[in-house]
Amino acid sequence: MNRGFFITFEGGDGSGKSTQIGILRDSLTAKGYDVVLTREPGGTEISEKIRELILDPANSEMDDMTEAFLYAAARAQLVRQLIKPALEEGKVVICDRFVDSSIAYQAYGRGLGDAVGVINTYAVDDCMPDLTILLKLDPEKGSGRIAGREHDRIEQASDEFHRKVYEGYLKLEEMYPGRILGVDASGTIQEIAEEISLRVEGLMER
Ligand code: TMP
């Protein structure tokens, strides 16, 4: 199989993922790579419909386990319909969030524990990222950055929930040092972009 390269971005709400994803996409495209940009939950027609269901603040009755299954369902569709085929064609896939989000938000944040990893074994189907960039920002600073806009159902969750999510990410960084690159997201846009670009180039040259 002519396998491409799979990069995911993770971090709390307001950690600056979108900016850094845009910079990396542009720089890889300029170097001649065929880059596919996608996001979670979403990225396919079906997964975007599931996204609406999950994030709609009107769905306040949603059970935590239902939420975990819906994220996994959106992921199962995205992996099979878009990510795997693109990697098989040798493309670089950049995904805004992936399975680590479910571990941080549902396993740690909601407190669902190991069940989340189990469900997601089926969702990711062995398709794990080659590199995960974790933008680390204190959750209080993150919520300050998104204060001016309308909040979705997850962003509306308590400060305590977002603190647990952050701690979950730090545990994941400790558990998978080879795959996850933790970057201090309080630096300047340029500093962060350079740190990411150094690691990505190093890996892709190999
Ligand atoms: P976004 O704001 O980065 O587009 O992501 C949507 C929200 O969904 C965000 O608050 C993080 C949350 N999320 C989870 O709780 N679990 C997941 O598996 C994913 C992919 C996202």
Image (spheres, rainbow, N blue to C red):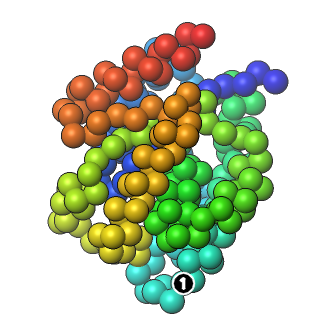
Q: Is residue 22 toward the left or the right of residue 186 in the image?
A: right
Looking at the picture, how far across and down is residue 128, in whole percent? 66, 39
Residue 74: quadrant of the picture:
bottom right
Secondary structure of residue under mark 1: loop
Residue type marked 1:
Met
Q: Is residue 173 above or below residue 49?
A: above
**Please, which residue is most extreme toward the top here?**
205
Which residue is rendered at x = 38% and y = 26% of the image? 196
Q: Is residue 38 toward the left or the right of residue 89 in the image?
A: left
Q: Is residue 192 toward the left or the right of residue 103 in the image?
A: left
Looking at the picture, how far across and down is residue 110, in whole percent? 50, 71
Which residue has dot 1 on it?
62
Q: Is residue 143 visible?
A: yes
Which residue is rendered at x = 21% and y = 34% of the image? 187
Which residue is rendered at x = 76% and y = 21% of the image? 2
* Quadrant assignment for the C terminus: top right
Residue 41: quadrant of the picture:
bottom right
Looking at the picture, how far across and down is residue 6, in whole percent? 60, 32
Count of numbered circles on the image: 1
**Please, which residue is most extreme toward the bottom here?**
61
